[in-house]
Amino acid sequence: MAPPSSWWGSEEQRGTPVVVKMDNPYSLVEIDGPGMPPSDKARGKNAKQFTWVLLLRAHRAVGCVAWLAGGFWGVLGAVNRRVRRSRDADDEPDAEASGRGRVMLRFLRAFLLLSLAMLAFETVAHLKGWQFPQHLPGNLQELEEQLQHLPEHLRHLPDHLRVPERQEIQGWLHRAYVAWLEFRVDYIAWAIQKLSSFCILLFMVQSVDRIVQCLACFWIKIRGIKPRIPAASGGIKPRGTARKSADVENNGDADDDADGYFPMVLIQMPMCNEKEVYETSISHVCELDWPRDRLLIQVLDDSDDEVCQMLIKAEVTKWSQRGVNVIYRHRLSRTGYKAGNLKSAMACDYVKDYEFVAIFDADFQPNPDFLKLTVPHFKEDPELGLVQARWSFVNKDENLLTRLQNINLCFHFEVEQQVNGVYLNFFGFNGTAGVWRIKALEDSGGWMERTTVEDMDIAVRAHLNGWKFIFLNDVKVLCELPESYQAYRKQQHRWHSGPMQLFRLCIPAIFRSKIPFWKKANLVMLFFLLRKLVLPFYSFTLFCVILPLTMFVPEAELPIWVICYIPVLMSLLNIMPAPKSFPFIIPYLLFENTMSVTKFNAMVSGLFQLGSSYEWIVTKKAGRTSSASDILALAEADAHTPPPAKLVRGVSEGGLQEWGRLREQEAAEWANKEDAAAALAAADAAAPATPKKSSKAKKPNRIFKKELALACLLLTAATRSLLSKQGLHFYFLLFQGVTFLAVGLDLIGEQVS
């Protein structure tokens, strides 16, 4: 039987359409079943379904955009809250808010805005195919036709560039783009290329100087060259034989006094509001192994906090009652910072009875045999003015920031100080952990308050007067590293602005001095210019200014070896004295480039005598003490040294009594007021407590604007390099920008778990 037909004569369609819904909720696929109509009619019947699909997709797109906008708004809110917290948490005036550093910040902001505008313009050019094509024109005639409408000097461009055709851009846009190309080639590219060549030259000179220093250090190691205590020192026992405690209590035996070399030694401990470290440092210094009738300890307290003054005075009283010759000294007029403090202490009448002076900052913890390992070097050499010991750090593994600082300072002591001490008998005094001959200080003019680097100042003047220095790489003194980026940045600002102040002041004295010409050349060319001025200049200019500019001006290029190979080689040389830090070589390289903005700003401030060059802020300390692991590490470094007794930090008896009296007085003053409880709580907060890592309060993070501006600038340049497919340039700019971002958000000093 024939199938029934419809009234228009075609076959009647039977069956039910089958719609299969796939995994994608917005993808509908129809399968023809028995009696299904043709596909075009099916699309007509299901038009409403496709309309709903489009609506659902639009809804998904709008939701995605809303999610991105909400996330961006949340990031802005988090940044705003962090900025407010950083301003509330910082008790000291902000250098940028108070006017210092505004010029640098404005320059970086203007540079960033210009880079963003150029990125937008170049992105449009890239999307329209004006630049960076996959293939150049097929024949030379076609290329010449494209270049005919351009000036002569624009017709020979790098192979990776293509001049846009006239039909691609018309009218004012064509004229603007061609004018930009002409201006870029004639002026900008030429200036960038000349500046980059100059910076590369400085970079190479500084790299050669560093390589020579490393080779000299290697020669010192393989030949075993080191200063040795003269054999005629008699009673000074070799390292590893500890004196009996009874000898110290009895002011030394008669045999030791007759055969040994125990001159009169003055120890000075300058400090200012050092609540966290005063007790540990005073305890270590008071336990030095030296006849007590030949030793005097001056605690030079410049604190303006009355509670801190009472605690330090009580600690001095405690050790004085135990028979140690220690005195507390507080200035009424605290001028000249540390230099003024030391100068005032040297003016005391009893100082003339002493031959040597040892200086320890508030966070330094010398071993008991420190004086026995340093003072005997003076006996056989009357021209020796300074014996400098090396620093070791109790908190070098605290966080990433302290690890990177340890790399820098290990190279400074192991290579720079040791090489200069062996071959030149001169290096910059580190301000602490050193012993001076008092005659050398007086002959050089004493402590001066004209710069913020009084230690380098006295070292340069002593060198100009013919005094020699010795660096002892084997004698180590424990101390602390700054654990926050804020404290480290302020310390580096002082360390890099002070030398430029000193350079301006010392130039006439250097040329008038009677030292040999090669020593004058070493002071001017190497000590000051190359290592204090050139290094921060080319680091900031080359990697933070020129490299981002070359992304927007491709006619001026930086070679790959300048960006990658030479910096990596220099980082390898820097990290060799601290081989355990080798896994941090890439973060170290990026962090050093990040610090170049602070060092460059400080260098300019000191060179041109700007206001911030005279800024002195005491580096904040956490109060770390020498643990058993620290002592064992020092014992492994020198197997002949017996580990000193562990000192446990706590509140001294006198300190508790003084604090108790102060608390009772404050409570009595607030007795008739409603907020007496608040006064007691404030007094409790002022009382020192034994630091515990588990109860360490986490301070709110800060925002550093210059670092954030540079982060945005480098990430913008990385985006531009991505358009040009420059490979290694993109990765370097990306990682460097991320490093600046982490430092700007104060993430570099986070605790290491």
Image: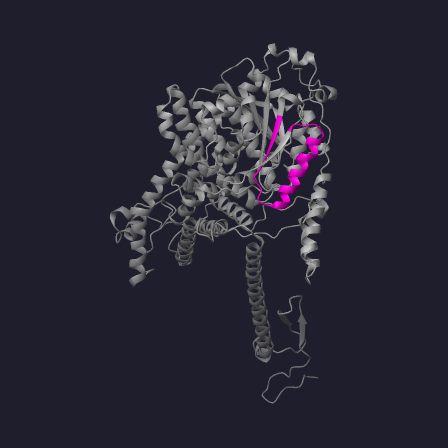
In the image, is residue 306 part of the stretch drawn in magenta?
A: yes
Q: Quadrant of the C terminus?
A: top right
Q: Residue at x 61, y 78 (%)?
A: 37
Is residue 679 in sight in this rendering? yes
Instruction: Establish if 460 lies above or below 700.
Output: above
Q: Tell me where residue 34 appears, x and y as whole percent.
A: 68, 76
Instruction: Establish if 673 lies above or below 659.
Output: below
Question: For residue 244, what is the image quadrant?
Answer: top right
Q: Tell me where residue 739 appears, x and y as whole percent.
A: 54, 46
Asked if residue 247 lies left or right of residue 362, the reply is: right
In the image, is residue 12 part of the stretch drawn in magenta?
A: no
Q: Residue at x 45, y 45 (%)?
A: 726
Asked if residue 669 lies left or right of residue 514, the reply is: right
Q: Nearer the viewer, residue 630 or 546?
A: 630
Q: Tell me where residue 449 appears, x and y as whole percent.
A: 46, 35
Q: In this picture, which residue range is highlighted in magenta?
A: 296-325
Q: Nearer the viewer, residue 400 or 436?
A: 436
Q: Tell me where residue 373 appears, x and y as whole percent.
A: 62, 20
